[in-house]
Amino acid sequence: MVPFAEALRRAGHELLVAAPASFGAAVERAGLPHRPCPDIDPDELAAVHRRMFAAPPEQRNEVFVSLGAELAARTIMPGLLGAVDEWRPEAILREVGELGSAIAGELRGVRTTQLLIGLDKFVGFTLPLAARALTGFRESLGLPPDPEGSYLHRQSSLSLLPLSFEEPGGPAVHRFRAPAAEPAPLDWAGDAPLVYATFGTVAGSVPFAAATFRTVVEAVADLPVRLLVTVGDGGRPEEWTVPENVRVLTWLPQPDALAGAAAMICHGGTGTVLGGLAAGVPMVVVPQFADQPDNAARVAATGAGLAIGSGEEVPATAEEVRAAVTRLLAEPSFATAARSFAAEIAALPSVDEAVELITGT
């Protein structure tokens, strides 16, 4: 969401980010003002996660949306309504998975736009489930029943993903590009190819995903490459014992990490995949859960990389990881496909052109 926030600021608008208190460091790192809202009770969230991971893999997304939609909206609502009532915004920009702000906007009559944080196919999957889960909560707030979620579907949708990465036949979406950041050069000279490995900021905290990430790093460390690893704000680089061709960091701006990279190996989170496509870097995707298998499938289908493993049920092996990275580095077709996505993204309208759509002015 940060590129759109920066575009709104460039256009002279005042901004306030209403987000759970636990997001404070990320919001502040982006240079934005943060209005802390309540976090979900850890025990309640753990119960949702237990039920999600207990479900068959093909049903986990449905279970998570059905259980998490009302819980998240109910938890964040006091903070959101406090922010809206005190600050009186003229517009709300919400990410599609944050449903409390959609209800808050409807309650207070504030223009609301949604930003997709994944493939547009998930609009058709997520919104009906969420709408049904939120029916009782809406009624408790005095809103009319809307089990079909028309209040969600009528919002304009924005995305940073290029159209050719989507599956055919999706909903109408306005697509934009973020300004290309000038990367800071990585102070790491050498002739060996640079490979960037990350499982993002969420997957690495899930035990089975963290174990797979260890397998990935250890497997790639054996190859004749320079391996740059980021473990997220909650990670501890000092706890990693690695050879000299590996560097482990907590966090690095994605453009910096991808600058000069010959390949990336990741979990398939949308932000990570988008960063690789925008930089024209081919990737090996090792999906774990949520939308990651779908993103991995699109990376493989479009030729921008390879997909290996299937989360907790069929974790990628060290042999598969080494073989995939070796192939990615040896066959130029993957880099060619990734660069074509970079060109497509560069040709999209700037996020500055989304300001009028968000504000209506």
Image (spheres, rainbow, N blue to C red):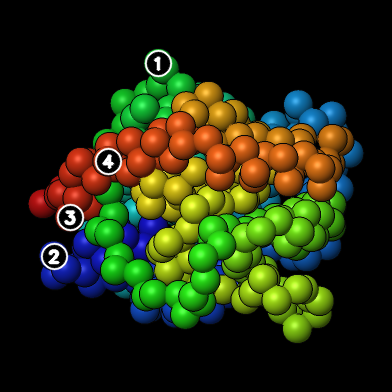
Of marks 4 and 2, which one's residue comes earlier in the chain? 2
Q: Work out how far the residue at label 4 is from the one at label 2, CA to CA, in angstroms.
A: 26 Å
- For the residue marked with disc 3, what is the amino acid? Asp
Q: Which residue is mark 4?
A: 343
Secondary structure found at label 4: helix
Q: Work out how far the residue at label 4 is from the one at label 3, CA to CA, in angstroms.
A: 19 Å
* Foreground label between 3 and 2: 3
User: Residue 294 in the image: x percent, y percent?
Assistant: 60, 31
Of marks 3 and 1, which one's residue comes earlier in the chain? 1
Within 10 Å of disc 3 (Cα), the crowding (few <14, some 14-19, many 20+) is many
The residue at 49%/75% (across/down) is 189
* Foreground label between 1 and 4: 4
239 or 93, nearer to the observer: 239
User: Residue 308 in the image: x percent, y percent?
Assistant: 71, 36
Secondary structure found at label 1: loop
- For the residue marked with disc 2, what is the amino acid? Ala
Q: Which residue is mark 3?
A: 352
**Residue 288 in sight:** no
What is the residue that sits farthest to the front in this orientation? 191
Q: Which residue is mark 1?
A: 169
- Whether residues under marks 3 and 1 lie with C-beta atoms below 8 angstroms apart, the answer is no
Within 10 Å of disc 4 (Cα), the crowding (few <14, some 14-19, many 20+) is some
Q: Is residue 349 above or below residue 63?
A: below
Secondary structure found at label 3: helix
Of marks 1 and 2, which one's residue comes earlier in the chain? 2
What is the residue that sits farthest to the left in this orientation? 361
